[in-house]
Structures are given as structure tokens and as C-alpha cells.
Image: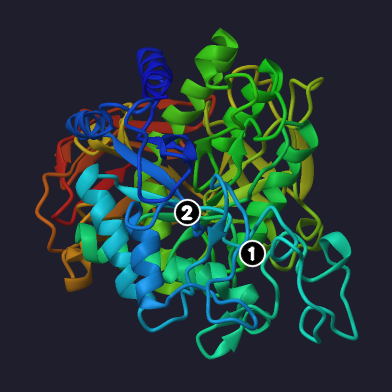
Amino acid sequence: SLNKTKEVLNRTRAAGIPLDAQWNDIDYMQHNNDFTYDKVAFRGLPEFVNSLHKEGLHYIVMLDPGISGSETPGSYPPYDEGLKEGIFVKDPKEDKPFITKVWNDKSTVFPDFFHPKASSYWVKQIRQLHETFAFDGLWIDMNDPSTFWDGGQYGCAPNPLDNPPYLPGVNGGKLYSRTLCMSARHHNHSHYNVHNIFASQEAVLTTQALLDVRKKRPFVISRSSYPGHGHFTGVWTGDVFSTWDDMAHSISDILSFSLFGIPMVGADICGFNGNTTAALCKRWSQLGAFYPFSRNHNTDNGIDQDPVALGPDVVEAAQKALLVRYSLLPYLYTLFWHAHAEGDTVARPLFFEFPKDDKTYPLHAEFLWGSALLIAPILSEEKTYATAYLPAGRWYDFYTFRPINSKGSTYLLPKQSDSIPLLLSGGNVVPTQQPNTTTTLSRENPMGLLVALCSFGKARGDLYWDDGDSLDHEEGVYNLVTFAAAKGQLISSVQQWKYVTNLRLTEVKVMGVDQPVTNVTIDGSPAHFSYKADVKLLNVTSLSVDLSKPFTLSWS
């Protein structure tokens, strides 16, 4: 209900846990019908969404591809209009929609997203829903397509498409297990020919619809996918179980999707199926804060698993991990820009950065954000320590900045009860920002730089920045600044500055400064600093550097 949604949202925010988007599953719908909302259980939903926007938050809802096929004629426009336009997937033999069953009360039909009129139909339905309550993104599920029946109500009539001479090892032992008959008809195609790309075609049309309706960047998360899908939407890994094994396996899932060209990916934090535990959710909240797509979501018949519901240990772990994530949003955003512009990965396996080190090839319990940040989560209940293989080079503990000069070995990392082990790779410059509990508020805060010098005293990095929501970046309205450190200097270079903003750099931490520092200047003027000899850290503070202009930070 909306009251329950508000309860969970309010206690999460009251606990100081960063949160940017409130999500609702199909519970918000009337009778589980797309493009409706329950005016009893979710009474006041439009006003609630408006209140979220005033607080700088966002709202995202579930949208299934299946349309109810059993409503009274004239009472449910999504069905009436689709029937009139002839855009539903058709029965193999008769000129009528293919009838199956998903969440709707009696029966379900599926739009044929390959039909020439499907795009205008989909845009119209999404626009009308958006005019009812102004959601910010859509979550498309059951788009494999998945059904509760094997084909239609009575299965599928014998035919070569549904009963091919060779059958791969598919779930249920038949091609139409829990999905449409392969002989169902699309526009100029059988379902057999388009089954694997059905979800991606829905994703394309949903993305285009949001562009048309909101006139802003679309945000769509999909369950099913296909190569090329990542250009349009992200994915979550489906209905994982609340187990330690599934949490550990989620890392491999996310890295695999990254290699498939889908950088916006995450698993349901704390698991979906079954009941989680406080110990599991604590560690999963830490790991999940470093999924590119980070969201806690569970089944409606499980216990509440938001951090507050599971107790202070989970609250503290989630809050700390997410505040680190929010402090690194400038870096994460820059990684996503590289993914968008160059097809790069965001979360990546270590062998991407160290291809000549064959010890990195089998690693699946640690991963990187870009080239700079190594995440080494604790993945079992009995452990309070994490181990991590560190390829040869200089690494730094993210929390203490203590250097580790690795020759390519596995290290026992410092005990972390309420924080996730993180390391910085030498040779990188990482942009940061003082965190707040929403990106809206965080964006107003001062910036910082983490300069992790390699053993040769060098480091490089960059910062991409724009307004975060509009399409102006397509016209070049964005900022791009590069950073290079060497020989006791950090130099910035402004590659582009067309987005008007007052980004100020207030702090620079330089790791791996081997000799004591007695003098620091910024563009020739003295700067306030401290030097910790035990960890070889130079911390330059009280700066007020305009990032739209090149600067040189020098130390000696």
C-alpha cells in the first residue's frame, strides 16, 4: 500500500541512509493491470510522487508487457485500443490475440513490439499514465516473455516450431514452457523468430516513449535482455534468493553483463526470494552499494528487509557503504560517461586492467570500478576479514590510505565489521564529492580529488559533469577535466566547459608521497596542508579552486 511505502521510505530517510528513488512493484496497479493505479490502497499516489520530487527524490514503477485481456469492453483502454489497432501478438491460426495468463485476474495478451503501430500505442499508454502520476523511470519485468501457462490455456497445437526435431536443454523440456507458443504470430514473423529479442524490442520502445513523454534522459531497468540492450536500458539479475551463495554469485553476474555491453546492472540487495537475515543483509548492503545499479528489493511474502527493519547493524553498514558510494558519484558518473561514449565497462573484472597477469583470470570474489577502485566484499557469515589478490603494483587502503606494494600476491585485508574492504590502485586520480543523502543535495557540495600515485610517482584521471537529467549533453553542454600527476605536481586541463556550474575543489589527498613535504602551492600561492609520514599521505585542504580553469598543485 501507499501507507506502507511511506513508512519504509520515512524510516530509511530518518536513519540517514542515502536514498534517491522509491520503487513500487505491481502492487500499485488496480487488479495488476498495466497503466492503472489502485485508488484505494494507493490513494494519493500522484500527490506522493510530487512530494518526492520536491525533496529531490525520484519514483519508478513496474510495467509488465502483458495487458489484461478480460476486462469489460470499453472499460480498459489499453486493451480496447490495442485490439482496434491490431497490435497484439496473434493466435497461430485465428485472427485474434494470443491468450495466455500472467498477473492479470483472468487472461493476458501481449503487445507485438515489432508491429509498425506498436510504438505509437506504447507511447500513448505511457503518456497517459505519466499524466496521472509523474514517474521518473520504468521497470519492465516478465518480458522474456514469461507467462504462467505453457503456451495458451491448452498448450500449443502440434507444429514444427513448438516441437522442433532438435530441442536444447530448456526449462520445462519444451520451447513454450512458461512462455508464448513459438507458433504465435507477430507482424511478419513467428514468435519462434523473435522470442530472444522480444525484451530488447520492448526496452527500445519503452526508452523511446520516455524520451517522448518526459523530454529527459530515460531510465529503464529490464529483466530480460539481448546483445545491444545496454544502449537503451539497464538490467537487474532477476529473482535471486536470499542466500550467501546468491550474494557471492551476483558478482559474476554483474561482471558478465558488463562484458555483454550492459553497464547499468545490479542484483536485488539482500535477495528477493525467501527471508534474508540481518547478517546476510548487512554484508549484501555493503556489496550492493557498489553495484552500478544499487537497489534493495524483495518478494511480497517475505519479511521486511529495508535496513531499519533488520536492526542497527544493518543500518550502520548500509549507511556507511552508501555514503562512500555517494562520495564517489563524480567518479562513477565519469565511468558511465566513458561507457556511453566509448563502450567501456563500469564494473569490470581485474583481468581487464591486468591482462598479462593470469592469476586475475579466475577471480570472481573481487572486482573493480573502472581502473581505480577495487571492491573486496566479505561473502560468508563466519568471516570478519576479506582477502584480495592484488596484481603487482602499488595499492592503497581506501580508509587509511596506507600503501601496499604488491608483487602479485593475495593479502589479508584489515578487519572490517561495519565497512566493505576497498583499495585504490596506484596511478589513478579519482574525483569525489562530499556526500549527502540524495544526489540532488550531493551535487551542491564541494569536490575533492584522491590522487593515488604509482611507484613511479604518477597518476591520471578525469571528471565528466553535466546537469544529470536533460538531453543538453547531446549538444555538447557538459564539462570534461583531465588530471595528471608527476614529479611533485598535479595539473588539470579543461577539455570542455559548456555546462554552467560553480564546481569548487576544496581538498586534494595525494597518496604515496615518499618524502616529507614542507611546501605546497596552488597556482603559485601557498596552500594549507598536512603530511602523515607513517602512511605517506599529503592532504591539501581549505582550497577554493574553480574547476572551470586549469590549475597546478605543487609540493616539495
Name the residue tied to disc 1: 352
Query: Which of the 4 image quadrants contains residue 441?
Result: top left
User: Mark 2: which amino acid?
Assistant: Ile
Report the disc number at residue 221. Answer: 2
Which one is in front in this view, the residue at disc 2 or the one at disc 1? Answer: 2
Question: Mark 2 or mark 1, which has the lower sequence index?
Answer: 2
Q: Is residue 192 above or below residue 311?
A: below
Q: Residue at x 32, y 51 (%)?
A: 490
Instruction: Tell me, yes or no, if residue 95 can be seen here.
Output: yes
Query: Which of the 4 image quadrants contains residue 502?
Result: top left
Instruction: Tell me, yes or no, if residue 353 can be seen here.
Output: no
395 sits left or right of 294 in the view: right
The colour mode here is: rainbow
Quadrant where the C terminus lies?
top left
Pick whichever, 383 or 128, lies toward us: 128
Q: Is label 2 in a helix, a strand or a loop?
A: strand
- Residue 191 lies, in percent from the top left, at 63, 79
- Residue 347 lies, in percent from the top left, at 56, 54
Q: Is label 1 in a helix, a strand or a loop?
A: helix
Quadrant where the N terminus lies?
top left
- Residue 385 lies, in percent from the top left, at 74, 24
User: Mark 1: which amino acid?
Assistant: Phe
The total of numbered circles placed on residues is: 2
Q: Residue at x 53, y 81 (%)?
A: 95
Pick whichever, 68 or 218, lies toward us: 68
Report the disc number at residue 100. Answer: none
Rate crowding at label 2 as few (under 14), some (14 to 19) or many (20 or more) other CA atoms within 10 Å. Answer: many
Rate crowding at label 1 as few (under 14), some (14 to 19) or many (20 or more) other CA atoms within 10 Å. Answer: some
- Residue 11 lies, in percent from the top left, at 40, 14
228 sits left or right of 359 in the view: left
Measure the C-alpha gap from mark 2 to mark 1.
Answer: 26 Å
Q: Is residue 157 above or below residue 509?
A: below
